[in-house]
Image: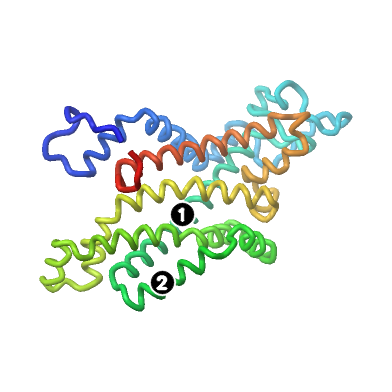
Amino acid sequence: MEATDARTVPPGSGPWQLARAELRRRTSVKISLAVVALFVFMAVAAPLLSALGGWGPEEFDRSAVDPYLGGQPLGPLGGVSAEHWLGVEPVTGRDLFARVVHGARVSLLIAFAATAVVVVTGVAAGTAAGYFGGTTDALLSRLMDLTMSFPSLIFMIAMMSVARDVDRIVLLTAVIGLFGWPGLARVVRGQTLSLKHREYVDAARVGGAGPWRILTGEILPGVAGPVIAYTTLIIPGMIATEAALSYLGVGVRPPTPSWGQMIAESVSFYDTDPMYFIVPSTCLFLTVLAFTLLGDALRDVLDPRSGRA
């Protein structure tokens, strides 16, 4: 890891000020943040953006496809025009821009919600196992091992296949979060073990502070850096997992748009209408890449003991 320019950081700055200065110095972080902000804005403002485009995600435009050519979009680049900014879906004529922005909302909502489940569960289990030790540590550690031993993708497909009359977004969030927390819990457990015998923790204990006060006031601030870095690295995995499940047909159900679902549907048309495949694939690729680069940078700065230099 490159050293932070001392001229940009005031003397006596704390670790968080040093981390912010280092992150601001990296061009990759600035670009990644810009891409992440763009897609988050796209997800939040999806109804407004689709209204500006003039088409909803489930509206059909039969005039935009040629019924005599198997429903191929009319015009170049998959029907790109002033009316359809990114073209249309083959056969249905649904506006691709509206589908993509609403797909961003679904994909990012599931990814962020599942990440929240992972972080809350992982931090709670990791701190409890590391701080209390003994039977608590043994039970939680065995539960982590048991959860990690499951073939998660196969189990997710099975659970999503048998659950029919359930909100798919809630179910996806719960299922993905169920298998994601042990990795973070192990990181937090290791950090907690290294912190619980530090001088300031012993001083708080001698001063009469209870376990809850020590965990929230002394331990959690100490593990915050690695947790933030790990969380940023979890998000792209969650996005990819949701896309994979939707691609396999056990994720979000049509007509609700999802990037993975759109990619799956576009496979049949990739040779005649490549734009239908390129647009959602590019969005998925850029989002995952931006979060991955951002997470790598945060890990370098906030958790230098991760082994990266």
Earlier-in-chain disc, 2 versus 1 = 1
Instruction: State how the image is colored.
Output: rainbow
Q: Nearer the viewer, residue 278 or 86?
A: 278
- Residue appearing at x 45%, y 62% in the figure: 182
- Residue type, label 1: Thr
Camera-nearest label, 2 or 1: 2
- Residue type, label 2: Leu
Q: Position of residue 199 (x, y in %)?
A: 14, 62
Q: Specify whether 24 is left or right of 95.
A: left
- Residue appearing at x 22%, y 40% in the figure: 17
Q: Nearer the viewer, residue 5 or 46?
A: 5
Q: Where does the C terminus fall, quadrant-wise?
A: top left
Q: Position of residue 211 (x, y in %)?
A: 23, 72
Residue at the spot of label 1:
115
Q: Which mark is residue 140?
A: 2
- Residue appearing at x 21%, y 29% in the figure: 5
Q: Nearer the viewer, residue 135 or 273?
A: 135
Say which element carries label 1: helix
Q: Can you say whether 71 is above or below 304 in the image?
A: above
